Amino acid sequence: MPSRYKYHELMPEIGREGQKRISQAAVAVIGLGALGSTCSMLLARAGVGRLILFEDDKVELSNLQRQLLYSEADIGKSKAELAKRALHRANSEVVIKAVPQKLSKINIKLLLKGDVDLVADCTDNLMARFVLNDFCVKNKLPLVHAACLAAQGQVFCIMPNRACFRCLFEGATAGITPKQAGVLNSCPAATAALQASQILRILTGKEPVNGLIRVDVWRCEVTRIEVKKNTKCKACGNK
Ligand SMILES: [Zn+2]
């Protein structure tokens, strides 16, 4: 029988063994805006065994410009439930749990190792990113962060024993947000594609690329900045 994942299996980077690992993995996607839409859709189509989707928001008209999971008929409805349905339509083999809640110190425990192998940070605020970082570092869970502003995106893979989000952004302030600066709709699509690639790389047992990946989709520039572990980091220092 032809495999649904033939085109991944043909790649030496993945192969049948890698595809098997992907199908046995569980990934939590936190945030189902523009990044989370594309990231979760790529992971579902790649055949990730289980997906847990966190999002408490409802669809608004201004989301449709870049949030690829939703349509006009969805305005006012829960993103988590809509996403679950859309991803299931794309791949019914994937077991999907929708959590239509804001990530909190209580429900974050759904992300404990054993239940989840990796966390995708598709949130839209600094506080949630720090909460996720600290939890994943403490529980030795790989975390793949992504963020976008205007035409610029970034991806950062936080692995046990590597630099964490706090090593890089401790002391950062919220600064200018997408609500002020806008978002070019291709930017989260491109950034989430880079994020999903690194996630698949980790799920197949390989190390993700090191450092902070930055992309400017308007200027067509991709750069990678080396990030050193801060030995005094509150989350990962001296561990
Ligand atoms: Zn750190």
Image (cartoon, grey):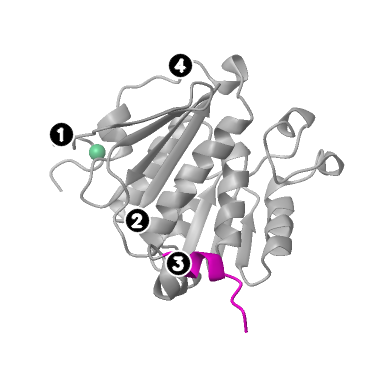
Which structural element holds mark 2? Answer: loop
Between marks 1 and 3, how big is the CA–CA gap? 30 Å
**76 over 48 or under it: above or below:** above
Q: Position of residue 173 (x, y in %)?
A: 40, 19
Badge 3 vs badge 2, beta-carbon distance below 8 Å: no
Between marks 3 and 2, how big is the CA–CA gap? 11 Å
Q: Is residue 178 left or right of residue 236?
A: right
Between marks 4 and 1, how big is the CA–CA gap? 24 Å
What is the number of the mark on residue 232?
1
Badge 1 vs badge 2, beta-carbon distance below 8 Å: no
Q: Quadrant of residue 171?
A: top left
Foreground residue, 10 or 18? 10
> In the rendered structure, which amino acid carries the disc numbered 1?
Lys
What is the number of the mark on residue 141?
2
Residue at left offset 48%, top offset 26%? 220
| Residue assigned mark 3 | 115
Foreground residue, 191 or 132? 191
Q: Position of residue 19 (x, y in %)?
A: 46, 70
Between marks 2 and 4, how big is the CA–CA gap? 28 Å
| Residue assigned mark 4 | 175
Which structural element holds mark 3? Answer: loop
> In the rendered structure, which amino acid carries the disc numbered 2?
Leu
Stretch of the chain drawn in magenta:
1-11
Which structural element holds mark 1? Answer: loop
